[in-house]
Amino acid sequence: MIAISACLAGVSCRYDGNANTCKKAQELIKEGKAIIICPEQLGGMETPRTPCEIKDGRVINENGEDKTKEFIKGADEALKICKLYGVKEAILKSGSPSCGYGRIYDGNFSRIKIDGNGITAQKFIEAGIKIKTEKDI
Ligand code: SF4
């Protein structure tokens, strides 16, 4: 089973209330090969919400509020779901402070990306889940 970022499936769970619909991700779900997760909503964040970025290991929103606790809770809940479904692979939305894999924003809301993983992506890696982004499918 594959876990897919819910926004890639067309769910309007992004910080701005929109989706990042990816047809290939939707096909995997329709074929019964994938489940969807939105770690930020699972962590209790509202939608729409103030955008967050990771800075010095903390997740801070654009207003300067620390949302690390919510992001960790969301990652834990997403991992719980993955374990229930026997997820071995995930297709996660690139660039997100939760789902981003390999490259994320630099924490200054400057649109500049640096090497790194989102909070959920990092947790998935540590749990042995193989990650791709929507750009790899
Ligand atoms: Fe999409 Fe992940 Fe952000 Fe949810 S947390 S909106 S699934 S990128």
Image: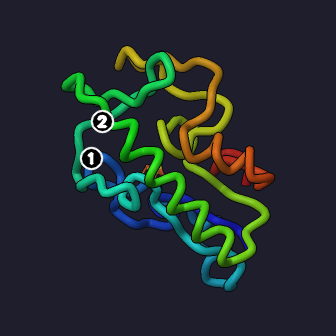
In space, the residues marked 2 and 1 are separated at their CA atoms by 8 Å
Please say if 82 is above or below 50.
below
Front residue of 119/69: it is: 69
Quick check: is the Cβ at mark 1 less than 8 Å away from ligand 1? no
Which label belongs to residue 16? Answer: 1
Quick check: is the Cβ at mark 2 less than 8 Å away from ligand 1? no
Q: Residue at x 61, y 33 (%)?
A: 117
**Dot 2 crowding, Cα within 10 Å, few <14, some 14–19, many 20+:** some
Q: Which residue is drawn at 24% across and 55% down?
A: 47
Q: Which of disc 1 and disc 2 is earlier in sequence? A: 1
Mark 2 element type: loop
| Residue 33, horizontal then vertical, whole percent | 71, 78
| Residue 135, horizontal then vertical, whole percent | 67, 45
Q: Quadrant of the N terminus?
A: bottom right
Q: What amino acid is labelled 2 in the image?
A: Pro
| Residue 34, horizontal then vertical, whole percent | 66, 74
Q: Residue at x 64, y 38 (%)?
A: 101
Which label belongs to residue 70? Answer: none
Question: In the shown orientation, is residue 117 left or right of residue 54?
Answer: right
Mark 1 element type: loop
Please say if 3 is above or below 15.
below
| Residue 71, horizontal then vertical, whole percent | 42, 45
Question: In the shown orientation, is residue 1 left or right of residue 66?
Answer: right
Residue labelled with disc 2: 51
Q: What amino acid is labelled 1 in the image?
A: Asp
* Circle 2 or circle 1, nearest the eye: 2
Q: What's the coloring here?
A: rainbow
